[in-house]
Amino acid sequence: MTPFDTVAIVDWSSGNDTGPKPRRDAIWIGQTRNGRDSEPYYSRNRADAEAYLSKLIEKELSAGRRLFLGFDFPFGFPTGFAQGLAGKSDPFSVWDWLEARIEDSPRSNNRFDVAAEINAHFPGIGPFWFNGLKRDVPGLPRRDIRNGHGMAEKRDCEGQTRGAFPCWQMGGAGAVGGQILTGLPVLNRLRRRYHDNLAVWPFEACEAAVTLVEIWPGLINPVVKRAEASGGIRDAHQVRLLARAVAALPPDALAAMLDVHATEEGWIMGLGHEDQLQNAAEEQQPLRPPPLRNDCFALPAGVDWTPVEDALRHLQDNLHPVVSTETLPLADCLDRVLATGVAARRANPPQANTAVDGYGFAHESLGSGDQVLPLVDGRAAAGRPFGRALPPGHALRVLTGAALPKGVDTVILQEDVTLGDGKIAFRGGIKPGANTRRAGEDVEKGDEILSEGRVLTPADLALASATGLARLPVRSRLRVAIISTGDELREPGDEAGPGQIYDANRPLLLSLARKFGYVAVDLGRVEDDREALRRVLDRGSVEADVILTSGGASAGDEDHVSALLNETGAMSQWRIAVKPGRPLALGLWQDTPVFGLPGNPVAAMVCTLIFARPAMRRLAGETWRAPHAITVPAAFEKSKKPGRREFLRARLRDGKAEIFKSEGSGRISGLSWAEGLIELPDGEIKVQPGDPVRYLPFTAFY
């Protein structure tokens, strides 16, 4: 079967809106795309979840990706239910019936009344039971006094599943009845909306771009329990792990799990294959760091204007890696961040060997003056050892890189030897150990060869390979979401009216993120609409590890970035003593760090390079380091007042730094003209041509 590119698992809930703070017993959605999983998405109500799933389907369809969309509630009922309720044994007739009757809002729904209406279609009492309302619902018993309704208690799959609950209980521990009644209408709307591109398993073949699948997290319960022991919300753990497990299944294993014939009742995918799912979840589970604290950006009380050095020190002290750890083959590790220090598995070189082509012998067997030594038959070559000890007083032909056999500790160059009939002659005076390399003279076994936080280079990979390491623990690539905000923005190529400008910041920031070696996630531009921005930030928190916005970071009426971050209670407004720049909004959105950059392009780039770049290095697991600056003579004159550190667009010509003609933050041409920045200190300074100045080439930030 054609593999799925994206796997999403939904933990459904029939309860009321659970509020803005992530909590248990809510709707959670785990997602893995092309082997990389996102942080679980918390949905506070079913309307939000349906909107999120619609956008997910549209995104995958537009990108040409196949989507496996799993839900944790039954798609069907025991045999005979559809006939008794809708008059035909087609499970989709039940979906249609429920969609026409379920009334659902974030604060309430009529699932108990609908359950009572269903009961009226069957004889006796039941099959649904449990009333969670304060009022009585005629036809729906509060306790299980059911009899004579004629329905089996469980579907065939539930009868074979340890711990699975029947579909008739509407509330209480383990109840899934309410989930079914509120969930199937949503699936029915998705099925109708994307009919040509969507199939429902096992009622339809899994040949469409999107397949809805019934699956149960209880199948990987042992793995979920181990993850839960480290803290966090169980629902979030199980959707994350189950999505990862399904995505990691070999195609033949997934095909076997989907090879089911259950045209009326439906089936739990993976039933009978629990070991495979659990192994896939275990094997794919990366090591994850804890989330950032809500106060990671909070400056000490009373701080107003923040010096640049204080801002950088605060970021260094309060941020930590937010990306997961995975172990990859060496071939896939170039430019990745090493997650932990690694030690040599064996010494380099592993044995003493010869550094030249020549002849080897024991130095202590030499006498004084010129030397004549008999040769033994054979030779030692790289990868082809001599295989026995050399007799004292003899010599052996050796080639570069050959392991020295026992009895050889010195080698003489072949150019310094006269070769006779089974003998060699050479001048005296050669030193002990000449032309040899001792075992471990480069690296000893157990030495740390590469340290945590290092961005791996080709030479690093050569060293790792030479010391026996085939795989390395590395950080997943940091995913950086970019958002532009403002009513005035238009896309290049579109018609721009009075007061409108083309968006320069998003191409700038997306390119910088890629240049830094991160995965750039383009979330587009958002008008000055708080709810629209909220939705885009929600997407960013799911699809990225850090979010960069431009514009809306001050305290004006249309500064929605600051306003929304303030709502979360995890926002700091930094007034940094820097030019260009100053306003920088920092905060967390659903545990994802957000950098609210200034709207002016020059200020946005300077703040990205000076503040966001080192912070993102830290979030990506790299070692914190300042950009390497050089001191060069100035080719300009500049008087600067005290109070703020200034960064001037600059470039080097004939070994001297010249600066752009204007310091305006809107002069984008200066960014293109420049090749780096001149950094002027916080205090007062007057620069004359020829004075030494601090130059930061743009390449120092990459």
Image (cartoon, helix red, strand yellow):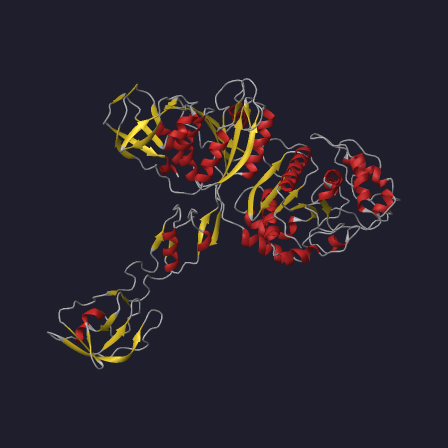
- From the viewer's side, name the closer residue of 414 and 597: 414
The quadrant the N terminus occupies is bottom right
> In front here: 152 or 654?
654
In the picture, which quadrant includes the C terminus? Answer: top left
Residue 659 higher or lower than 194, as above or below = above
Residue at (32% x, 37% y) in the render: 628
Identified at 29% across, 64% down, the residue is 439
Residue extending farthest to the bottom is: 421
- Determine whether, in the image, residue 427 is placed left or right of residue 651: left
Asked whether, in this view, residue 700 is left or right of residue 93, the answer is: left
Q: Which of 442 and 639 is in front in this view?
A: 639
Query: Which quadrant would residue 56 be assigned to in this image?
Result: top right
Instruction: Give the tally of numbered discs.
Output: 0
Q: In which quarter of the image is residue 616?
A: top left
Q: Where is residue 662 in the image (x, y as percent from the top left)?
A: 37, 21
- Above or below, comparing residue 414 to residue 329 in the picture: below
Across and down, in percent, residue 375 comes to: 23, 79
